[in-house]
Amino acid sequence: MSRENVEIVRAAMDAFERGEVERALAMADPNLVSTRVDPDGATFRGHAGFLRMVDEWVEGFTEWSWRGDEFIDAGDRVLVRQHQSARGTASGVLVEGEFWLVYTLTAGMITQLDIYSDRSQALEAAGLPA
């Protein structure tokens, strides 16, 4: 089942990247819990909460893009190393960063998403050795 979880996460991320938001959300439980562990620990609930989290994340930026560079199977969790880049709306400065996303799946549905900026914290959260 865990390899299947990687494929579900990959499919959801690909759909979201293509702008197929409803298709991506169809792979997530309606009670999805999304937490921005870094920088502020904010938690969001449901599909609407996830979309609000994304809106807040990209606020103040243009040309936001991302790609999943690495997908790690961790049983009922999938760890994704994600590279993001965006341009500051006011400054025009290009900003790039690497984040670690830990997806938790239950019965083939994404039930939780936690975003980390620290790799070792993300590995620990996914139940993997740092």
Image (cartoon, grey):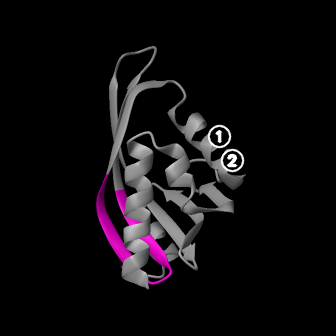
Q: Which residue matches tag 1?
A: 52
Task: Identify the image quadrant of the N terminus.
Answer: bottom left
Q: Tell me if residue 129 can be seen.
A: no
- Residue range of the region highlighted in magenta in the rendering: 68-81
Give the residue displayed 34% in from the left and 73% down from the top: 72
> Residue 21: horizontal and vertical position, in percent?
52, 44
Q: Is residue 51 visible?
A: yes
Viewer-nearest residue: 5 or 23: 23
* Percent position of residue 13, x then y: 41, 54
Dot 1: element = helix
Q: CA distance from mark 1 to mark 2?
A: 5 Å
Q: Could you say which quadrant of the image residue 33 lies in? A: bottom right
Q: Is residue 66 above or below residue 5?
A: above
Q: Residue furthest top?
A: 90
**Image quadrant where residue 54 sits:** top right
- Given residues 14 and 100, the one toward you in this image is 14
Q: Quick one: SS at disc 2?
A: helix
Q: Is residue 37 magenta?
A: no
Badge 2: residue crowd in 10 Å (few <14, some 14–19, many ≥20): some
